[in-house]
Amino acid sequence: MNSFKDKVAVVTGGASGVGRCLAQQLAADGAKVIITDINAEKLASVAAELTADRPSGTIEGIASDVTKEESVQGLADTVFAKYGRVDMLFNNAGVGLADMRSPFWDLPTKDWVWGFGVHVMGPVHGIKAFVPRMIEQDGEGFVVNTTSGNGALHSITNTPIYASSKAALTSLTEVLYGQLKEKAPHIKVGILFPGPRLVNTGLLDSPRPDEYRDPANPLPKGVAMSDLAQRMGGVEMTEPEDVAAYCLECVKKDQFWMLHPESSLDGFEARAASLRERRNP
Ligand SMILES: NC(=O)c1ccc[n+]([C@@H]2O[C@H](COP(=O)([O-])OP(=O)(O)OC[C@H]3O[C@@H](n4cnc5c(N)ncnc54)[C@H](O)[C@@H]3O)[C@@H](O)[C@H]2O)c1
């Protein structure tokens, strides 16, 4: 896709972090952007704020919850009715689960349902609601799913839900790529690894709906990603603007693996060697 001018783009999790920056940069390049988020209040203020920048495209906020199929189908119906088409879908919404607070076996089932609901079923709902109608359109389309090196390359063992849900998302994105390449090659697919370092967003203070709270298992207070970077000895961070810019550069180049060249592959190489040599991890 050479240009975003007049293209219609839907960005989930668009009220914060990487999603907000994707929306801002797409609209600056002339796209008509629909941002969606579970946090309706923040979504409205971000849409107004980005519109006040006078982008050459447009930005509209429509609230939805990616864990709920009917909510995403309703979003798709509203967008297709108003804009007539969708050229790009960014399945970007994600949550920090505080899943390092207990061992795997003590984490509440509600946490697993939430994590897999947002990271796996969220993109599945997005693909089911948007892709069939994108296939029927003329012209190129693009679907970007946002994974993480944690799960996609190797799994950090103290984040069982985050890592395993991103691993599942990575697999389903590779499958989607293969099927679309064969059956509808005008719809391209990419998988984004935000990075190359920790990205300075609100991911560790995600809004957790009451249905995913377990009173018997109290949660730590949410923190900014920059606090985590401080606790890790002041490690360098990546800004979400840079992640969005790299992602859009990859969309223009039709690049599937949206993995920044400076991202570490050490964990991935160690995992591959362990598997190849039948050596325990
Ligand atoms: N920040 C990092 O270091 C990092 C690293 C690797 C991957 N990621 C991934 O990048 C993506 C963007 O996250 P971010 O870092 O910008 O975090 P963020 O918290 O700033 O943004 C995520 C947005 O998703 C929204 N969201 C959460 N649940 C939702 C739901 N059910 N329906 C709709 N929206 C929902 C949140 O309200 C929030 O606005 C996520 O998929 C995340 O897993 C982030």
Image: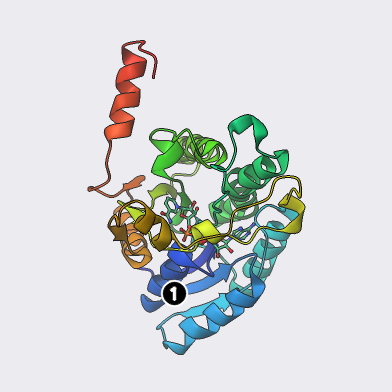
Relative horizontal placement of residue 60, taking residue 24 as reference (left or right): right
Q: Residue furthest top?
A: 278
Q: Could you tell me residue 257's position as x and y percent?
A: 34, 44
Q: Which residue does the image show at 55% across and 69% down from the upper left?
A: 35
Farthest left residue in view: 262
Q: Position of residue 67 (x, y in %)?
A: 68, 52
- Image side of residue 269 versus residue 44, left or right: left
> Which one is in front, 42 or 218?
218
Q: Secondary structure at mark 1?
A: loop
Q: Measured from the top left, where is residue 160 in percent x and y?
A: 54, 36
Q: Is residue 1 visible?
A: no
Q: Is residue 7 above or below residue 188?
A: below
Q: Nearer the viewer, residue 92 or 185?
A: 92
Type of residue at label 1? Asp
Residue shown at the point (45%, 65%) measured from the top left: 17
Compared to 99, does 235 lie above or below? below
Decide: is 269 above or below 216. above
Instruction: Give the percent coordinates (x, y) of residue 3.
Output: 34, 67
Determine crowd level at label 1: few under 14, some 14-19, many 20+ residues with C-alpha closer than 10 A: some
Q: Which residue is mark 1?
A: 6
Front residue (pair 155, 131): 155
